[in-house]
Image (tube, grey):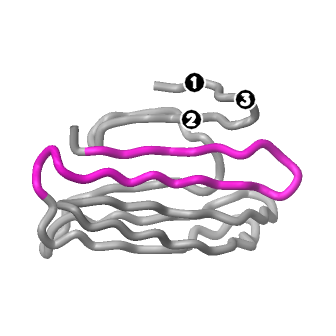
Amino acid sequence: MFKMLGALAVITASANAAEPPAGPIQLIAEPAAEGLRIRVVGASEAPYSAVFSLEVTSGGNHSIHRGSANLQGGEAVTLSTVTLGNAQPGGWRAALRVEPQGSQAYEQVRTSF
């Protein structure tokens, strides 16, 4: 689902739902041998700069990861990784907020709901 909240574009999806890309920095949730892996991945055809925050909740635990990205054109990089070893079905949420330099902020949300 996509909606506008003022100057923020918000995209919400379950972990398995396909959605149109919001921007060069994406939130990916995928099964891993040790549980659930949540990654922030950046890829851009042209140089791109932004700050981001990743907020993850699972089973009463809550963490926030902040960073900045200076992407070079044509290269994909993992900017942050969180592994949930005890992720319960229906019990985790990940929200990525990206504030690009010179353009509109956007947010992506993945949940197990």
Count of labels in the image: 3
Residue in the image at 64% along x and 70% along y? 75
- Secondary structure beneath dot 2 equals strand
10 Å crowding of disc 2: few (<14), some (14-19), many (20+): some
Which residue position holds label 2? 10
- Dots 1, 2 in contact, CB < 8 A: yes
Residue in the image at 47% along x and 69% along y? 64
- Dots 1, 3 in contact, CB < 8 A: no
- Secondary structure beneath dot 1 equals strand
Q: In which quarter of the image is residue 98?
A: bottom right
- The amino acid type found where label 2 is placed reads Val
Residue 72 coordinates in the image, percent (x, y): 75, 71
Residue lying farthest to the right in this orientation: 102
10 Å crowding of disc 1: few (<14), some (14-19), many (20+): few
Horizontally, residue 23 falls left or right of residue 18, namely right
Q: Which of marks 1 and 2 is nearer the N terminus?
A: 1
Which residue position holds label 3? 6
Is residue 78 visible in this depiction of the protein?
no
Q: Tell me how far mark 1 sits from mark 2, CA to CA.
A: 5 Å
Horizontally, residue 48 falls left or right of residue 112, namely right
Residue in the image at 73% along x and 57% along y? 45
**Residue 107 part of the magenta segment:** yes
Magenta stretch, main secondary structure, is strand
Residue in the image at 34% along x and 66% along y? 62
Which segment is the magenta one? 88-111
Is residue 97 visible in this depiction of the protein?
yes
Taking 54 as reference, is 106 above or below it?
above
Give the quarter of the figure containing the N terminus. top left
Which residue position holds label 1? 3
Q: Which mark is residue 53?
A: none
- The amino acid type found where label 3 is placed reads Gly
Q: In which quarter of the image is residue 88?
A: bottom left
